[in-house]
Structure formats: C-alpha cells, structure tokens
Amino acid sequence: MVFLTLALVVVTIVSVCILKHQLEESREDAWNGMAPFIDLARTTVVTTPRDSDRPLVVLTLVNEGKDPAKKVRVIPLLVLRTRGKPLSPPSDSCFLDSKGNPTFGPTYPPDSPQIVIMEGTVTPAQRTAYEEGSARLYLYGRVKYQDFWREDLPKQKRPASDSRSSIFCRSFGKENEEFLRMKPRPEGAELMVPCTSEEWPFDDHHDGPETGRPYTGACTQQEALKQP
C-alpha cells in the first residue's frame, strides 16, 4: 500500500513537471509568434538625381508583428554610388549618442506605418555616372527595437539581446526613372527595387552574426558618401 502511494506521488510530480514544461514551451512559442517585426514596406522616390542635386526618398516602415515594438530607432543612409559594389549595414554603435549611451525612439503598434524622409547629395560627377547608367541611388540601413512585452517572458527564455534588429537595402537607377516619366505611371513604378545579392549578401528578415561585417564609415550621411 505504501509502495502504491509513493508510486502515485512520483507519477503526479512527474506529470506536473511535464505539464509545466509544456506550458512554458507553448508560452515561449506564442511569445515568438507574437513578436514585433519592423520592415521596410515601401520606398518612394520623390525627386531623382536628375531632378535635383538633393534627391528625396520617402521610407515607409511598418510593424508586421502582432505586438507593439518599443524604442524603435532607424539608421537609413541614402547615397549615389557605382552599381554592384557591396554595402554593409550600420553597426550597433550607430545607435549610441555622443556619450556612448543608447538612443531610443517611439513605440510602433502593429500595422501602423511610419514615414521617414531621406535627402541625399549628388555631385556633378555622380550625376553624370547616374545618367550613363554606371551609378545608382542606394538606400540601406538598420532598424533596432524592443519587444513591448519582453519582460513578461521568463528570464531564462528571453533572447540574449534586449533589442531586435532588421536591415534593408533598395536601389534606384536611370532605367527605373524612365518609368517615372511615363504617363500614366505603371503601378509601383516610383518604388526602389531590392539590392542584388552582390550588393547586399544578407537576409533582411533574419538579421544575425552574418551581418556583423564591420561598417567602414561613420553613421552620418556625409561619411556614408565616402564609402568606396
């Protein structure tokens, strides 16, 4: 009788432990499934390198996840450079202020588009290269943000980094501009196109160690123009 009682106690304890583990796993899966994801949804060219020596691009960022993304920060760079050359995402140090402290931005709820306006600078030599088709307008960068509900996850289940990260790269050239000048414009003709695998050998949706290649320039528009 004592043996049966002990056996029942052991079975009960094991069952409770298994159930607890399953609940923790399901909670973790649900948390990962609800996690925010900031993506570059649209890039619209307002003024081209032919129109002005300061081309203008409008970025539309959207949170495609199911939870809010808090402390959203974006480092976008807009440059006109030789087509086909590799680019690197801005490093984490770009998100620090002059004193080395993290900078923080707003909170983006799910499905809420956010607009960022970028202005570039084009020299006469760069405009000539653009008109000849050997240079393109490139928009690339990195977004960092945090999960609004991260603190609800058990500490041992939280990701190693406090921040999530997304990267992006788009380009626009003379051939894309020809569509802009057509009337009526084809649907989406004003949009920048994804960079090639040679220019951007990364997966925008799975930012990780493979994107840790050192960034050779400072995180300012002026320094970005100096990249080879």
Image: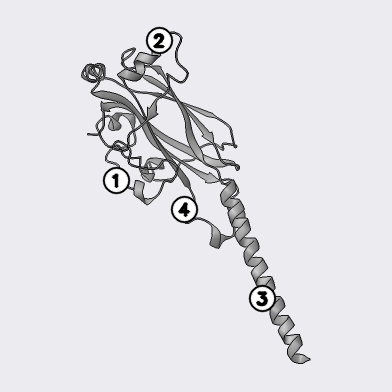
Q: How is the image coloured?
A: one colour
Residue 205, picture quadrant: top left
Element under label 4? loop
Could you tell me residue 174's position as x and y percent?
30, 18
The amino acid type of the residue labelled 1 equals Pro
The residue carrying mark 2 is: 182
N-terminal of the two: label 4 or label 1?
A: 4
Residue ID at (43%, 8%): 183
Is disc 4 surrounded by few (<14), some (14 to 19) or many (20+) residues within 10 Å?
Answer: few
Mark nearest the camera among 2 and 1 is 2
Could you tell me residue 64's position as x and y percent?
55, 38
N-terminal of the two: label 4 or label 2?
A: 4
Residue 215, picture quadrant: top left
The amino acid type of the residue labelled 2 equals Met
Rounded to the nearest whole Å, what is the CA distance between mark 1 and mark 3?
Answer: 49 Å
Q: Are marks 2 and 1 in contact (CB under 8 Å)?
A: no
Which numbered tag is attached to residue 14? 3
Element under label 2? loop
N-terminal of the two: label 4 or label 3?
A: 3
Q: Nearer the viewer, residue 11 or 155?
A: 11
Rounded to the nearest whole Å, what is the CA distance between mark 2 and mark 1?
Answer: 41 Å
The amino acid type of the residue labelled 4 equals Ser
Is disc 2 surrounded by few (<14), some (14 to 19) or many (20+) residues within 10 Å?
Answer: few
Q: Please indicate whether residue 89 sits to the left or right of residue 67 in the image.
A: left
Taking 190 as reference, is 2 above or below it?
A: below
